[in-house]
Image (spheres, rainbow, N blue to C red):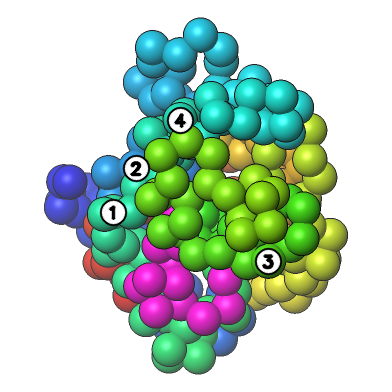
Amino acid sequence: MNPIPPDMADTILRLKDILQNSDNIVFFGGAGVSTESGIPDFRSADGLYSTKYAYPPETMLSNTFFVRNTGEFFKFYREKMIHPSAKPNKAHFALAELERQGKLKAVITQNIDGLHSAAGSVNVLELHGSIYRNFCAACEKSYPLEAVLQAEDIPRCRCGGAIKPDVVLYEEGLDESIMERAATAIREADVLIVGGTSLNVYPAAGLIRYYSGDKLILINKSETPYDGYADMIIRHSIGETLNAAV
Ligand code: ZN
């Protein structure tokens, strides 16, 4: 990843200043946070779309598909959605450091890879769930990721039920208590950093409408529908940017 280019030095200084002067920062992140850990964004053109599978990812990641084609679901899920060897990157570590300093109050993420927790963040609101939590669809007994990884076909509970990842599939609603906590954190935030998301995915993207402050910082390589509302836009690596500013 590129280090900070010279013409960005002023921007980084401004960002650093904003972060140093706040004790109520909230971070909202998407797939772009994890691409720097080598996890592809399944919505981007070079992500999962150009794959060998017969159905589009939205179909294979739907609840209907899970119910009707459970074996096929797990084949796709294990191959494309789980990256157990991925490690947190500079963005994850910088955010964990801000929380340790008492400055950052919450990380809200659309990612299911658990990398924020792996980096040491404590208050992580996982809007789309986590690959590390799994439960039996019949009796609700919980299982670790290993149960999904080790099964050759459909991972099964001792009761015979299929083990289902605790990730939000298409057709399923988001967890309302997590949405509520995310909305409250954003509403009360002094600084809101939005990173690695094109803000096109609803309802999660609508969350940033709860922010009413004047320090909305967007860090994303491409344009977003919220660029006009941002107080600072940074088109650079999120890991390098946060690493330089924290
Ligand atoms: Zn069971």
Which mark sits nearer the N-terminus, 1 or 4?
A: 4
**Placement of 56 over or under 10, stated as above or below:** above
Comparing labels 3 and 2, the label whose residue is closer to the camera: 3
Q: Are marks 1 and 2 in contact (CB under 8 Å)?
A: yes
Q: Amino acid at mark 2?
A: Ile
Residue 83 visible in image:
yes
Q: Amino acid at mark 1?
A: Ala
**Placement of 234 over or under 200, stated as above or below:** below
Which mark sits nearer the N-terminus, 2 or 4?
A: 2
Q: Which residue is mark 3?
A: 141
Q: Amino acid at mark 3?
A: Lys
Q: Are marks 2 and 4 in contact (CB under 8 Å)?
A: no
Based on the picture, tell me whether residue 112 belongs to the magenta stretch: yes
Which mark sits nearer the N-terminus, 3 or 1?
A: 1
Q: Which residue is mark 1?
A: 86
Looking at the picture, how far across and down is residue 103, in whole percent? 51, 85
Residue at the (43%, 46%) spot, across then down: 151
Q: Which residue is mark 4?
A: 75
Based on the picture, tell me whether residue 89 belongs to the magenta stretch: no
Task: Find the magenta span and give its range.
Answer: 110-128
Residue at the (43%, 89%) spot, across then down: 100
The residue at label 1 has a CB less than 8 Å from ligand 1: no
Name the element at disc 3: loop
Looking at the picture, how far across and down is residue 198, in whole percent? 54, 36
The residue at label 4 has a CB less than 8 Å from ligand 1: no
Comparing labels 3 and 4, the label whose residue is closer to the camera: 3
Distance Cα–Cα, label 1 vs label 4 = 19 Å
Q: Which residue is mark 2?
A: 39
